[in-house]
Image: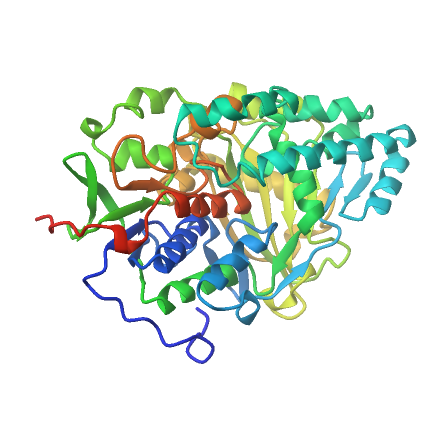
């Protein structure tokens, strides 16, 4: 953990007369919510199932290597800076963000590659190498992306969508922006070259969506990245997690570890606290769940308290793909490998159909290779490299037995990396750790092991998604990837931002009588 004792103001001493807010889970959505609730005057307790904060952004440290478990791409850094400002601080006091360029190297099966960045001239040159006739299409696509961004992110990103009329009001604008089309369909309107259609349509995979199925509203990501860039936190994404924990503690809040919530306690239709697996009862006027939304409704609330998100509805909903992630360290450096690389396999649409529709584990794969030591050598011992490689795979409804398949699948990925980006890899591995869809379910409490919660298709977005203010239970709120606006760091941070318009300041809350265990 970071040392805040010298840089941080004297922690506020919370009064037990203050209304109490409990936050379930210490992912980025939960930590951001806790900071915002603390700024509203609540006494805040964050409850984390694991032994350290972060949730999907947990940090593994082994053999001298530091591995960020999940998010590695920081966009829209102002959403983090806002949280420090709420505490009278500057993010730069605790965290150093550095730009990454290119954003991604996208490598095709034949060994050719496209360097994706925010430099418009460089992008035009890259496009011209593949298809000179598509250069003008790039400029037109970015204008379209900007128009979608101005609506989808700037106007709607922190709108609660608590009523169906909120959706009806924006329907004409969504139609005007062709939001009924898929990302791939809209991209194909601007690019003729199939490889460029892949380059400009892969972004939804970063938030758990199939480019052939998710709404083209997610084309806003292209402009979002151009506007604010892609960044990396020196020391790893875990530095942001530690920084937020420091803010919460500086407000007088608490973050408790090894504190798994068994149930959200409901009295007269309102959440009034939580009960831990240990049996401990914690009273609260406000409960915020950063747990997976389907998990929250299916496992933390009794069925008697639910009318909309019934077991049947949860079971029938569509869920994002899962992930197989292999973290590994090498005894040598691969200095020609950039920070972010996407290695495309021999199939694109067909592979995504296997993952999202057929739900079968295919023999081929596309990979995201993260080499943070390209930017920060402190994450590995001297002369070594730290990596993680991520493969999108079906969630647990595929029936794959990952206890049997994990090592076999890892070896297949290692062979592919050894034949492409990392020669002689097997002889240089000195540290290894794996995360499978089973771990997403068992360790991270993700329903069906889906890494991003509900699939972000149009009929499961905005008002159709589990609301930030629970439709089922008063005083219960949701943040994180499974609620509005969705996955990705900008999405989960915005979900906490939504709470500002939903939860009153602590002075306007009536203290509840304690609930007996």
- Relative placement, left or right, of 422 versus 40 is right
Residue 144 percent coordinates (x, y): 72, 31
Task: Work out whether residue 399 can be spotted.
Answer: no
- Relative placement, left or right, of 436 versus 287 is right
For the view shown, which residue lies furthest in the left direction? 516
Which quadrant holds residue 110?
top right
Taking 437 as reference, is 382 above or below it? Answer: below
Q: Nearer the viewer, residue 344 or 294?
A: 294
Q: Residue at x 37, y 36 (%)?
A: 293
Task: Work out whether residue 63 can be spotted.
Answer: yes
Residue 373 percent coordinates (x, y): 65, 61
- Relative placement, left or right, of 338 versus 121 is left
For the view shown, which residue lies furthest in the bottom direction? 6
Q: Residue at x 54, y 46 (%)?
A: 490
Residue 271 percent coordinates (x, y): 22, 41
Q: Quadrant of the N terminus?
A: bottom left
Q: Residue at x 75, y 34 (%)?
A: 143
Q: Residue at x 58, y 34 (%)?
A: 152
Q: Say how many tags the image has.
A: 0
Residue 456 percent coordinates (x, y): 51, 29
Q: Nearer the viewer, residue 426 or 114?
A: 114
Taking 477 as reference, is 312 above or below it? Answer: above
| Color style of the picture | rainbow
Taking 464 as reference, is 6 above or below it? Answer: below
Which quadrant holds residue 473?
top left
């Amino acid at each position: 953990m970071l040392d805040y004792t010298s840089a941080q103001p004297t922690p506020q001493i919370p009064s037990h007369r203050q209304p109490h807010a409990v936050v379930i889970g210490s992912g980025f959505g939960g930590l951001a919510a806790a900071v915002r609730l603390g700024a509203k005057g609540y006494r805040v307790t964050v409850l984390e199932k694991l032994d350290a904060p972060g949730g999907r952004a947990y940090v593994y440290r082994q053999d001298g290597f530091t591995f960020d478990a999940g998010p590695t791409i920081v966009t829209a850094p102002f959403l983090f800076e806002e949280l420090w400002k709420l505490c009278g601080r500057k993010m730069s006091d605790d965290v150093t963000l550095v730009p990454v360029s290119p954003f991604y190297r996208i490598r095709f099966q034949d060994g050719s590659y496209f360097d994706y960045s925010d430099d418009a001239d460089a992008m035009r040159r890259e496009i011209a190498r593949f298809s000179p006739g598509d250069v003008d299409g790039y400029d037109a696509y970015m204008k379209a992306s900007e128009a979608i961004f101005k609506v989808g992110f700037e106007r709607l990103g922190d709108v609660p969508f608590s009523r169906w009329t909120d959706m009806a009001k924006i329907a004409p604008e969504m139609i005007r922006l062709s939001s009924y089309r898929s990302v791939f369909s809209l991209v194909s309107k601007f690019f003729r070259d199939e490889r460029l259609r892949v380059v400009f349509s892969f972004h939804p995979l970063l938030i758990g969506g199939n480019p052939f199925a998710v709404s083209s509203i997610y084309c806003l990501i292209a402009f979002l990245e151009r506007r604010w860039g892609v960044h990396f936190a020196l020391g790893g994404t875990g530095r942001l997690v530690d920084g937020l924990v420091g803010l919460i503690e500086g407000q007088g809040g608490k973050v408790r570890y090894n504190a798994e919530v068994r149930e959200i306690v409901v009295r007269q239709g309102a959440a009034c606290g939580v009960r831990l697996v240990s049996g401990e009862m914690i009273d609260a006027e406000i409960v915020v769940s950063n747990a997976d939304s389907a998990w929250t409704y299916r496992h933390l609330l009794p069925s008697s308290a639910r009318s909309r998100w019934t077991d049947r509805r949860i079971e029938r909903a569509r869920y994002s793909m899962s992930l197989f992630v292999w973290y590994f360290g090498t005894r040598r450096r691969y200095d020609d490998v950039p920070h972010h690389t996407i290695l495309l396999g021999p199939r694109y649409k067909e592979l995504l159909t296997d993952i999202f529709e057929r739900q079968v584990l295919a023999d081929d794969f596309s990979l995201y290779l993260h080499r943070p030591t390209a930017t920060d050598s402190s994450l590995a011992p001297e002369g070594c490299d730290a990596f993680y490689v991520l493969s999108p795979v079906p969630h647990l409804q595929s029936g794959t037995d990952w206890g049997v398949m994990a090592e076999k699948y890892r070896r297949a990925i290692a062979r592919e990396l050894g034949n492409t980006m990392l020669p002689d890899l097997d002889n240089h591995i000195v540290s290894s750790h794996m995360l499978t869809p089973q771990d997403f379910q068992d360790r991270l409490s993700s329903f069906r092991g889906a890494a991003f919660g509900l699939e972000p298709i149009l009929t499961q977005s905005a008002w159709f998604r589990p609301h930030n203010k629970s439709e089922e239970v008063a005083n219960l709120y949701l943040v994180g990837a499974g609620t509005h606006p969705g996955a990705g760091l900008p999405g989960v941070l915005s979900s906490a931002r939504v709470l500002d318009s939903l939860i009153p300041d602590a002075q306007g809350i009536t203290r509840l009588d304690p609930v007996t265990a």
